[in-house]
Image: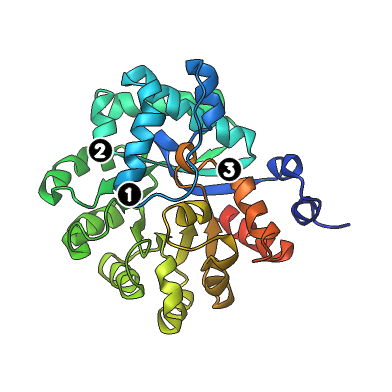
Amino acid sequence: MKQPFIAALENRSLAELRRIPKSDLHNHAGRGGNLKYIEAWANITIQPHSGTFASLGEMQEWFVRSVKSHCPGMEGYLKRIEAAFVQAADDGIELLALSFGIDEIGSLGGIESFIRIMDSLRQRYAPETAFLPELALDRAGNTDAIHGHLDEIFSRQWFRSIDICGPELAQAIRNFRSIYRKAKSAGLMLKAHTGEFGTADDVLEAVVELELQEVHHGIAAAASPQIMQCLADQRIRLNVCPTSNVMLGRTKDYASHPVRKLYDAGVSVTINTDDLLIFNQSVSEEYLNLYLCGLMSAVELNEIRECGLRSG
């Protein structure tokens, strides 16, 4: 009997794909829900963005104008987090890594209150989903100020991983070394955004400087056989987000996505959503897109799915 995920892809059945366990390991929590869920709550219609964004700034402007404006304030923020958990349950996400910023913790009254609220939302809306919360740091942030929050945050042993996101050229990655040493001592998995807009060398530098175990995006590594070999040898996994890469102009289309080269080079990869409220493609849809364009076979995509489920 054919493996169910393979059969679902070959049948081009989104409904079947949604019933099969998957992971979403790169998902910004406040942007991780489904547009239709927000539309129903706010009683509005949101027109998904078509075409590509010229920059991260333009993407953020669209999100604020088209989505966030309809769910403002604390009520709106919590509704968007709720939407991310609902989406995970609806799409068969068995393993979910949602990332949260330090400012989000403060907006809910501190770490104790924040943890209580997030755990309550997860238990109510995605009780069968294993939750892997991730602390996301701003690449442009003041590293001294970040240090001032870490002892309290890490003492709760709630976050499972740490990430740096935002414009890759905002400051040198080495400025975060001491933060990552502290995170490593606290037992967190070490991840960072790199190689989304930068170069293959940037990916390697981040891996070495921060002792990364995973890279969010990292697709620029596909330009260097040597660096891909290094990633494969060190078993550094790349959490790839195909639609995000297409809509931000990092690759022309699904059929030319670098995940093919990375996979062929033996680099461990997973498929993820990044910002579902912006890019409007679920994990199931991401897999189907890569299959329908002919980039990867159903068997290969199932291997990637199984790789994601071995996380945590």
Between circles 2 and 1, the one closer to the viewer is 1
The answer to whether residue 157 shows anywhere in this view is no
- Count of numbered circles in the view: 3
**First-in-chain label (2 vs 3):** 2
Task: Give the residue displayed 36% in from the left and 65% down from the top.
Answer: 195
Relative to 52, is 64 above or below?
above
Display colour scheme: rainbow
Q: Which residue is mark 1?
A: 56
Q: CA distance from mark 1 to mark 3?
A: 20 Å
Task: Give the residue displayed 73% in from the left and 64% down from the top.
Answer: 299
Q: Which residue is mark 3?
A: 282
Q: With 230 as the anchor, is 140 left or right in this view?
A: left
Query: Looking at the image, do the residues carrying marks 2 and 3 touch, with CB atoms under 8 Å apart?
Result: no
Q: Mark 1 is on which residue type? A: Leu
User: Which residue lies most toward the front here?
Assistant: 51
Q: With 56 as the anchor, is 284 left or right in this view?
A: right
Q: Residues within 10 Å of mark 2 (few under 14, many from 20)?
A: some
Residue 23 image offset from top left, x and y in percent: 57, 48
Q: Work out whether residue 226 or residue 45 is closer to the camera in this orientation and state it.
A: 45
**First-in-chain label (2 vs 1):** 1
Q: Work out whether residue 200 or residue 51 is closer to the camera in this orientation and state it.
A: 51
Between circles 1 and 3, the one closer to the viewer is 1
User: Which residue lies most toward the bottom here?
Assistant: 226
Q: Mark 2 is on which residue type? A: Ile
**First-in-chain label (1 vs 3):** 1
Q: Work out whether residue 223 or residue 160 is closer to the camera in this orientation and state it.
A: 223
Q: CA distance from mark 2 to mark 3?
A: 26 Å
Q: Residues within 10 Å of mark 1 (few under 14, many from 20)?
A: few
Query: Looking at the image, do the residues carrying marks 2 and 1 touch, with CB atoms under 8 Å apart?
Result: no
Kindly identify which numbered label has been placed on residue 102.
2
Residue 43 image offset from top left, x and y in percent: 51, 15
Task: Give the residue displayed 25% in from the left and 69% down from the top.
Answer: 209
